[in-house]
Amino acid sequence: MKNSGRKGSSFSSVSLSPLLWPLVALGLILLFNFIFTAGFFQVRLQDGHLYGSVVDILTRSSPVMLLSLGMTLVIATGGVDLSVGAITAIAGAIAAVSLQSSGLTGSGGVALPLAIALPLLASIACGLWNGFLVAFLGVQPIVATLVLMVAGRGIAQLITHGQIISISNSAYHFIGGGYFLGFPFSVTLVIGVLAVVIGFSRKTAMGLFIEAVGNNPVASRYAGVNTVGVKLLVYAVSGLCAGLAGLVISSDISAADVNNSGLYLELDAILAVVIGGTVLSGGRFQLMGSIIGALIIQALATTINTRGVPVQLTLVIKAMVVLAVCLLQSPSFRARFRQSTKPRLPRITGAEGVTLKAQSDSGPSGSGGL
Amino acid sequence: MKTQKTLVTRTKLSLTLAFLTVAFASVLSGCTEKSTKTTTNTTTTTKTESSPAKAALVVGFSQIGAESAWRSAETQSIQDEAKKRGITLKFSDAQQKQENQIKAIRAFIAQKVNAIILAPVVETGWEPVLREAKAAQIPVVLVDRGIKTSDETLYSTLIASDFVEEGRMAGQWLIKKMGGTANVVELQGTAGAAPAIDRKAGFQEAIAKSPGMKIIKSQSGEFTRSKGKEVMEAFLKSEGNKIQAVYAHNDDMALGAIQAIEEAGFKPGKDIVVISVDGVKPAFESMVAGKLNSTVECNPLLGPSAFDAIDSLVAGKTLPKKTLVKDQVFDQSNAKEVIASRAY
């Protein structure tokens, strides 16, 4: 009786809170702008597409949203993928170089599908390499993906000879800079990928396998889950997401800037995942949460840029907001906060403590009696 | 064509895999093998005997690496100038490692070169090796970056651009263009970087003279196209029609900003004047297209000045501790003529 009641309450808190707190944080940032930043929510049509700060937040956050989707799955298996930033650089570099060589032959249109397919295939290969190191060789994920994080940018520099390569293909520019029915295409892309990943992880058993591997890889292997396959898959998906992000980034600025494309973006992606309510130790994941997390990060950045915060203060303000969001997100912090403000909860925990104490007391004394 | 392309990708892929395996192996073994060092210290010697009078002159050049087009242009300039003057140049690429540069300098000293040109990768840690050069009476000329040392006699002169002057020139050009009144937004470089600090200071100093010039927004675009575009987008949202000019601390940010301006429905170069610093080739292309208004060159072609300095030093003259390279403003009026001759 008592057990079932507790289970019910914990179930309701799980289904409600993971998305609630990230949404509250995002809402607070937007509310701040609603009150203090004039014209922040103004959206108008400009040359047939939506134009405004809110649209900027969506467009600018799309690379991090893409990265965070793959990252969420990787983190759910108890891993982490540090190489995603470098993979964006590789993808952008391959796209730019293949478009360039096709430009020489004068057939830009024919090569475009190839110029999109090649970088994506390379990104999947990069992801599989990470998965291979983690799943087959048993290298710690943070170390295994660090290899590609460092080497990947070097590979991208090899491809472009360290130069920024301009992309003059207007069809390619559509990926990151175009508009689909007046709506930024990069955001449409994110929604598409999100739908696929959610469908794939929630409508099939795959999500369960991923969580199982994250919770207890040994037990799930004994239960018949192909842990090696699951890990390979999530790293490959993460690589693919990074490749898509790389296409978005490079097509947005119409150039492959390998030294800066996706630089430190892996950290933003991890942050988005964590803010979104996915635990770094794995075993559970919140795809929508990660999307909201990415939106929080970008809403903050856009707010800072729009309001004209002194450059020296920018990072400090970012850090403070991130800290606040993380604390808001943390159940143990909220519990402590509630404990110190509300008198009702301590009494309950106190009562539990007493029963626990009574149980533990009875144990040793019983054994002592024997 | 298709097979060729797949072949290219396949080689790229196998290259990638080979690279990764090496990287992985080095991570596992603790990154301390000596094997890489033989490849990093490639010293090539260019010899030409066009002018016999100076044929005896041997100069060692320790370059940081080839991380940007700017640096490649600098290397090319010094190599070309050496060839032109009939100087034997011993060139060493340090691949971003001070350790390699120090070894190269020691090698130059052992080979008894007449002078050493050094582009220092970092500011500190040069005293011991420069003391050795001084003891061997070999003058050292620093190019494009300075060093921090308590003993200034360790090097003969520093040949570099003056970032403050670049900012000043940008400011003066803009005042002239805008007739002394304009609302300017500034895209700063990476917070704390010397070029960002100096280019900001120089620009502010220049526009302080005309009270009509105002910086209405200033934010870091981190020297990159993406950030330049992102920050400019935000500026356009908050200031809109008020913005009359953009001052970017480098060309890449300006190129990003130009895209943002276009997407907001304005004409860059006409509705909003854009000026930046560096003078890379894409900036010239943008000027020819009428989008970027002006760029202040940060000249990497230091070869002539470097060898002029060496000639004076070998002749026994002393030079000032800092030789500033003259930078030039380019704008749409002369971009077309010079674009073909741009080396970087």
Image: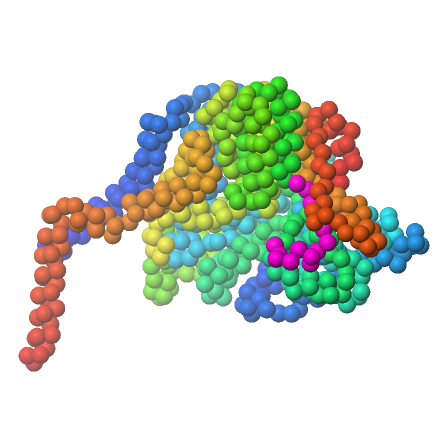
Horizontal and vertical percent for residue A131? 49, 58
Residue A64 part of the magenta-drawn span: no
Q: Residue at x 33, y 27 (%)?
A: A35
Query: Which one is in front, B103 or A365?
Result: B103
Q: Is residue B300 left or right of residue A300?
A: right
Quadrant where the C terminus of chain B is found in the figure: top right
Residue B69: which quarter of the image?
A: top right
**B344 relative to B29 in the view: left or right:** right
- Frontmost residue, A255 versus B149: B149
Q: Is residue A232 above or below residue A137?
A: above
Identify whether A363 is placed above or below B298: below
Let me know if residue B159 is in the magenta part.
Answer: yes
Can you tell which quarter of the image residue B131 is in?
bottom right
Q: How is colour applied across the structure in the image? A: rainbow
Q: Indicate the position of residue B46 as horizontal and vertical percent values.
A: 83, 56
* Residue drawn at 21 percent across, 45 percent down: A12
Residue B292 picture location, percent across and down = 64, 28
Q: Which quadrant would residue A318 be assigned to in this image?
A: top left
Residue at 57%, 36% in the rendered image: B201
Q: Which residues are magenta?
A: B148-162
**Quick check: B265 above or below A239?**
above
- Expressed as whole percent of the image width and height from the top left, the position of residue A119 reads 59, 45
Question: Total number of numbered labels?
Answer: 0
Q: Quadrant of the N terminus of chain B?
A: top right
Q: Residue at x 65, y 50 (%)?
A: B146
Q: Is residue A249 left or right of residue A103?
A: left
Farthest residue toward the left? A369
Question: Visible in this render: residue B124?
Answer: yes
* Residue A65 appears in the figure: no
